[in-house]
Image (spheres, rainbow, N blue to C red):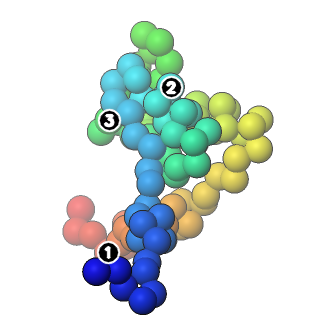
Amino acid sequence: MPSESPISFLDTVLLVGHGEWRHQIPFITMGALNGSHVRVGLEDSLYAGKGKLASSNAEQVKLIRSILDPLSFEIASPDEARAILALKGRDHVRF
């Protein structure tokens, strides 16, 4: 039985584009084009381009920014990303 004040599915879900290995950059680019948040990291792919090993997470961030910035996407700051993803932040973990 429907509720009198239904909650939209899209109001309760955070859509994050994610790809692994060689598909990471193409998949998250498509995710952004389709309206999702995106994230990159060495935990998902060791590469920063075809056949090029990434030296750091920062290199992957620079790569995806170089794709999304010219398309006028708004890029979240690290603090904004932590808030969007409800992450604790470096000062609240023990490593």
Q: Which of marks 2 and 3 is in front?
A: 2
At label 2, which amino acid type do we have? Pro
At label 1, which amino acid type do we have? His
Q: Are marks 1 and 3 in contact (CB under 8 Å)?
A: no
Label 1: few (<14), some or many (≥20) within 10 Å? few
Label 3: few (<14), some or many (≥20) within 10 Å? some
Q: In which quarter of the image is the N terminus?
A: bottom left
> Which is nearer the N-term, disc 2 or disc 1?
2
* Residue located farthest toward the top when viewing the structure as drawn: 51
In the image shown, does 17 or 58 lie closer to the viewer?
A: 17
Q: Which residue is drawn at 42% across and 66% down?
A: 9
Q: Which residue is drawn at 70% across and 47% down?
A: 73
**Residue 7 screen position, x and y as percent:** 43, 78
Q: Name the residue under label 1.
A: 92
Instruction: Give me the C-alpha separation between circle 1 and circle 3.
Output: 23 Å
Label 2: few (<14), some or many (≥20) within 10 Å? some
Q: Is residue 30 left or right of residue 39?
A: right
Q: Is residue 8 above or below residue 61?
A: below
Q: Which residue is drawn at 40% across and 40% down?
A: 18
> Which is nearer the N-term, disc 1 or disc 3?
3
| SS at badge 1 | helix
| SS at badge 2 | helix
Q: Are marks 2 and 1 in contact (CB under 8 Å)?
A: no
In the image shown, does 29 or 58 lie closer to the viewer?
A: 29
Residue 18 showing in the rendered view? yes
**Residue 88 screen position, x and y as percent:** 35, 72
Instruction: Give me the C-alpha separation between circle 2 and circle 1.
Output: 33 Å
> Which is nearer the N-term, disc 2 or disc 3?
2
Task: Residue 26: give its label.
Answer: 2
Q: Mark 3 points at which residue?
A: 44
Q: Nearer the viewer, mark 2 or mark 1?
A: 2
